[in-house]
Image: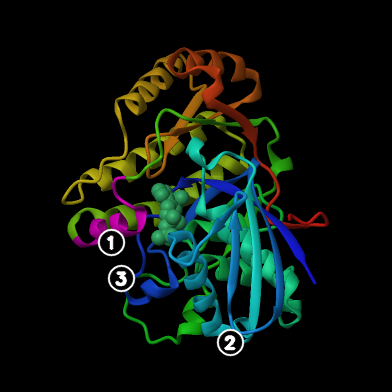
Amino acid sequence: MTTTAIAPTNIAIVKYWGKNPAFENLLLPTKSSLSFTVKDLYTKTTVTAKKGSGQIDFTLNKKKILQSMKEYEYVEEFLRKVSQFFPFILKYDYKIISENNFPTAAGFASSASGFAALIKALAGELKEFENLRSDDRQLSALARLGSGSATRSIPSKGGFVIWHRGLDYTEKVKISQIDAHNCSYAETLFEPSHWPELVIIYAKVGKEEKKIKSRAGMRTSIDTNPLYGGWVKYEEEEMNNQVIEAMKAKNFPKLAELIMKASNNLHQICLGTYPPIIYLTQKSMEIIDAISELNKNGIKAAYTFDAGPNPVIFCIAKNKDEVMSSLTKIMGSENLVVTSMGPGARYESKNLG
Ligand code: 2P0
């Protein structure tokens, strides 16, 4: 058989930055995070499984991925992690063909959509996974084993998603690996139809080549930033609820303010890490200034930055032209992708390859 799945990328509003040290192998986050599922940026993955011994034949963006390449290692490691809970997964050989509908080099690449599409396709392909195919809770937990942010790309309704942290990382608990694994998953809080006027603009201001990989960076932040615990507590106990309330009320000025504050908080945590982690560049600062200027007489737009210099901008449809014209002055329209909230991971009848 052959199965194809599509999974969107997602953009975090309240960020994930750090793993529970007691369950680092399960990528359990220290805090819950909130994101938008993005309509027009996604990964499509076709999987063909045959009885075998876990061999992988992997093609990514029309390029054969050799065993010595890091992308191959990521997939191999992912299958090994999934096999802890579902040992049958290593009793098959896999042909995996995966394509992003956006140029990886453009800096919009995302491991989130990649691992989400892979687990969704695997669940459709293997008969042993029959009961999981449309179980977003279990599938999102499994996607997490590939990359934390992939958890949020699974819920099939997409839209505005919460990834529950599960355990409080400051408390010592006696819990089995499987119970710890099952308690951290994602779900949709508001579907895209809740707020179709919400516009999401991806902007490219620089190459996404990260000087410091998120995974290593997060760990150093926990170990060296004395404000880390306070940040987690504040966002877990206060900010998440405020963002959910602003979404529910479709209160854009309030939501925008919180989005910018949450982004600033992440980069403040990064800068307070030792040695400091600096993702924002001069160009990123120009965007922050331009948005602040736009918002002088009433909030019209919000920015957010992840582990790189590229912003994602939010506005509502009636202000889109004004926001776009301000962004175009800084970076040119060819570096902007305008999209909105969209659905989550799903099956697709047309196979790749
Ligand atoms: C996020 N980021 O919430 C945050 C904001 C980057 C900054 O999730 O180690 O690639 O594979 O779990 O998911 C990037 O981290 O890290 C990320 P791993 P991942 O989107």
Local SS, label 3: loop
3D distance between C-alphas at marks 1 and 3: 15 Å
Taking the image as shown, residue 105 lies to the left or right of residue 50, namely left
Instruction: Classify mark 2: residues with Cα within 10 Å, few (<14), some (14-19) or many (20+).
Output: few
- Point out the tag, 1 or 3, that comes first from the N-terminus: 3
Residue at the image point whose x is 39% and y is 42% from the top? 262
Q: Main secondary structure of the magenta part?
A: helix
Can you identify the residue that label 1 sits on? 219
Residue at the image point whose x is 29% and y is 25% from the top? 282
Can you identify the residue that label 2 sits on? 87
Question: Does the closest atom of ligand 1 sit within 8 Å of the Cβ of label 2?
Answer: no
Can you identify the residue that label 3 sits on? 170
Residue at the image point whose x is 47% and y is 38% from the top? 107
3D distance between C-alphas at marks 2 and 1: 29 Å
- Which range of residues does the magenta coloring cover? 211-223
Residue at the image point whose x is 29% and y is 54% from the top? 217
Q: Quadrant of residue 137?
A: bottom right
Q: How is the image coloured?
A: rainbow
Count numbered badges in the picture: 3
- Point out the tag, 3 or 2, that comes first from the N-terminus: 2
Q: Amino acid at mark 1?
A: Arg
* Observer-nearest of 271 and 216: 216
Q: Closer to the observer: label 3 or label 2? A: 2
* Observer-nearest of 56 and 33: 56
* Observer-nearest of 206 and 246: 206
Taking the image as shown, residue 215 lies to the left or right of residue 63, namely left
Q: Closer to the observer: label 2 or label 1? A: 2
Q: Amino acid at mark 2?
A: Pro
In the rendered image, residue 190, in percent from the top left (x then y), is placed at 66, 48
Label 2 with label 1: CB-CB less than 8 Å: no
Local SS, label 2: helix
State the quadrant of the N terminus.
bottom right
